[in-house]
Image: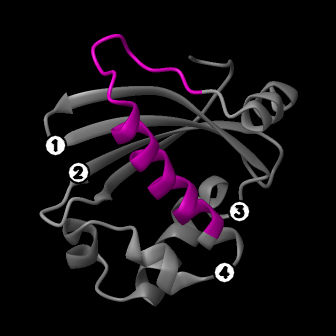
Amino acid sequence: MHRILIALTAAGLTFSSPCFSGETEIKAVQDVIDGQLKAFVSNDGALAYSFAAPNIKRMFPTADIFMDMVSKGYAPVRRPKGYAFGKVQEISPTSIIQQVLVTGPDGKDYEAVYTLELQPDGTYRITGCSLRASNSLST
């Protein structure tokens, strides 16, 4: 799967559900996640934290607390060796779920499922992420 993730990442492929075809929204959502993942890799806690929605910022009131939580509970997204976007689904006019296929620092494959919410300023912010080990490529 590691080779598949690299190939998908290099190709920039996105798989969307037929019910959600807003390419502008998909790109905006993926840009947010990509920005946060790149900030994690570069150890830029303030930038990574800036992609979090208000609900996350209430639970983790500083960038340092947020980064500590991510480091302890989300190592594959904190230090990904590679990642590719998978399925995307609109769950309401302002909420989107985006699957990200991740190769973690341990070389194992994971599925990260992000939820994002459209903010009053027109930007998407990450409201949550669930992570699980993956045994196969899911698209």
Neighbor class of circle 2 (other Cα within 10 Å; few <14, some 14-19, many 20+) is many
Q: Position of residue 44 (x, y in %)?
A: 60, 83
Mark 4–mark 3 CB contact (< 8 Å): no
Q: Which mark is residue 79?
A: 3
Mark 1–mark 2 CB contact (< 8 Å): yes
N-term mark: 2 or 3:
3
Mark 2–mark 4 CB contact (< 8 Å): no
Compared to residue 128, the image places residue 21 above or below, namely above
Compared to residue 52, the image places residue 64 above or below, namely below
Q: What amino acid is found at the position of numbered circle 2 in the picture? A: Glu
Which residue lies at the image location 57% right of the left edge and 55% below the top edge?
34
Question: What is the distance, in whole Å, between disc 3 and disc 1 at their CAs?
Answer: 29 Å
Which residue lies at the image location 55% right of the left edge and 63% below the top edge?
35
Q: Quadrant of the C terminus?
A: top right
N-term mark: 3 or 1:
3
Element at badge 3? loop
Q: Which residues are magenta?
A: 14-38
Identify the residue under disc 4: 43
N-term mark: 4 or 1:
4
